[in-house]
Image (spheres, helix red, strand yellow):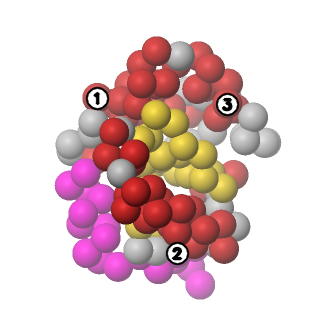
Amino acid sequence: MSYSDNLFYGASPLIHKRARELRRKLTPAERVLWNLLRKKALEGFKFRRQHPIRNFIADFYCHSNKLVIELDGSIHDEVSQSEYDKGRTEELKELGITVIRFRNEEVFETTEDVLKRISKYLTP
């Protein structure tokens, strides 16, 4: 298994293509958080945005800590989306990946708290 296989957990070319498209269309909340995470700005940890993992695209991923950060808008309040999110989180857990979720509003209104909560999952 190569480094890239491990990094992407066998994500298909189609998932990679979709991730590239999503990187060009970040939501406002994703853009705010990305500006705070990019270029190792949070405690020197490297994050990737719209990162392919197996059949999924994580909003943000820190490979060194196997941490996925997901930002949720109002669609995630719908029962079907909520169930999908739970199943996805379980599948990622099986890969040894931790998933933390934030509401879009949290990113805008309590940015420092969001960064502190993320930091709790980061270990050198």
Residue 40 location in percent, x, y?
56, 33
At x 66%, y 55%, the residue is: 98
In primary-sequence order, the first of circles 3 and 2 is: 2
Name the residue beneath numbered marker 3. Answer: 117
Write down the residue under mark 2.
9
Q: Which amino acid does label 3 sit on?
A: Arg
As drawn, the residue found furthest toward the right would be 124
Using the numbered discs, state the Cα–Cα distance from disc 3 to disc 1 in whole angstroms: 20 Å
Disc 3 crowd, CA 10 A, few/some/many (<14, 14-19, 20+): few
Precedes in sequence: disc 1 or disc 2: 2
Residue name at image x 60 percent, y 46 percent: 100
Task: Name the side, left or right, on which 45 lies relative to 123.
Answer: left
Of circles 3 and 2, which is in front? 3
> Which label is found at residue 92?
none
| Distance (Cα) linking label 3 and label 2 | 26 Å
Where disc 2 sits, the SS reads loop
Distance of label 1 from label 2 (alpha carbons): 28 Å
Say what secondary structure mark 3 lies in. Answer: helix
Residue at the disc numbered 1: 28
Q: Where is residue 86 in the image (x, y as percent from the top left)?
A: 53, 62
Q: Quadrant of the N terminus?
A: bottom right
Looking at the rendered structure, the kind of residue marked 1 is Pro
Q: In which quarter of the image is residue 7?
A: bottom right
Q: What stretch is highlighted in magenta?
A: 1-22
Q: Main secondary structure of the magenta part?
A: helix
Which mark is nearer the camera, 1 or 2?
1
* In the image, residue 49 above or below residue 54: above
